[in-house]
Amino acid sequence: MKLPFISVILPVRNEERFITACVESIFSQDYPADMMEVIFVDGCSDDKTVPMLKEMQKEHPQIVVYDNPNRTVPYAMNIGIKNSRGEVIVRLDAHAEYPPDYIRLSVETLLTVDCDNAGGVAKTVGRGFMGSAIAEMLKTPLGVGNSTFRISDKDGYVDTVPFGCFRRELFDRIGGYDERMTRNQDNEMNFRIRKNGGKIYLNHNIRVIYYCRDTLRGIMKMGFMNGKWNVITMTLVPGSMGVRHFVPMAFVLSTILLVLLTLLTHSMLFGGLLALEWGAYLLLDGFYSYTIAREKGWKYFPVELILYPAFHFAYGFGSLFGIAALPEFLKQEKGKK
């Protein structure tokens, strides 16, 4: 197969902790270095990200750096695509490292399989003890539901993949990234691909190492923001989000309602339903925490017991906050038109 010239695009902002390892993994690829450009689009970093990239340009002239005054990922991707030269676009993330065959397998899959976006499986890892504990949580069905690209070991057509590899003409045909999407821009893009008759293909041999948050505060903030933006995304683009994205909201909302009804009515019915719901949840929490601790070490057990409900409640409250903030958000979006 004749390999095409490709454009690798990475949105970045304050990635000094991860940027060196990420760049090293990109230039350790078995894809010919003279057949790619690597575009970093910086969202106003206030750390050493840009100076570090400028320094690495001396060794790797394929690196190009653009500014993104709007900061968010969809703006960055559109800037990168507009200024790119490749006939294939490979969207990467700086918070990750890539095995040597990642880009080649992505491009080969795109060009040999009937699909419009090719991707693989994200292996979540963390730095330090808390980062490792969070990563283990995010590898389980209780942590991520049926998120295929996190837990799959099979090839096939899916709803979404992490990052992605696309033919350039796709963006000419269906448009660029939706710049309203501070989050969930990949979900929205993949939904639009499917809506226009396209396909997303997951090749389980394509692997990426993704670094998760490494503090309790960090993972709770991520969960809160994801929950909030799931509501906004579903409102702006109906059908783009799956049922699993709203399970934490249903859990939090049902807990609040059952507590209130129990206190107001003193009914054993509502109290029993609350006990049943939380009994089932704590059984699952205990089971997955035990499973992780048995493999990784018993010091993980009490941490995992706390991580699951902390993450789920932050996620659920984020969705409820998203509902409350939705009118103002829609008003602001209308004002931009």
Image: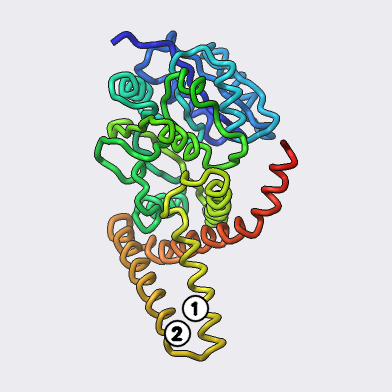
> Residue at horizontal 58%, vertical 25%?
78
Q: Position of residue 327 (x, y in %)?
A: 68, 54
Badge 2 local density, few (<14 within 10 Å), some, or many (20+)?
some
Q: Is residue 28 above or below residue 71?
A: above
Q: Secondary structure at mark 1?
A: helix
Q: Write the residue at 31% across / 20% down.
A: 108
Q: Please state which amino acid type lies under the numbered disc 2.
A: Gly
Q: Quadrant of the C terminus?
A: top right
Residue type at tag 1: Leu
Which residue is most to the right? Answer: 335
Residue 271 has which mark? 2
Q: Which quarter of the picture shows residue 119?
A: top left
| In this picture, residue 26 sits left or right of residue 329 | left
Query: Which circle marks residue 258 in the picture?
Result: 1
Give how far across and how far down residue 112 sits, in percent: 28, 20
- The location of residue 223, given as percent across then percent down, is 52, 54
Q: Are marks 1 and 2 in contact (CB under 8 Å)?
A: yes
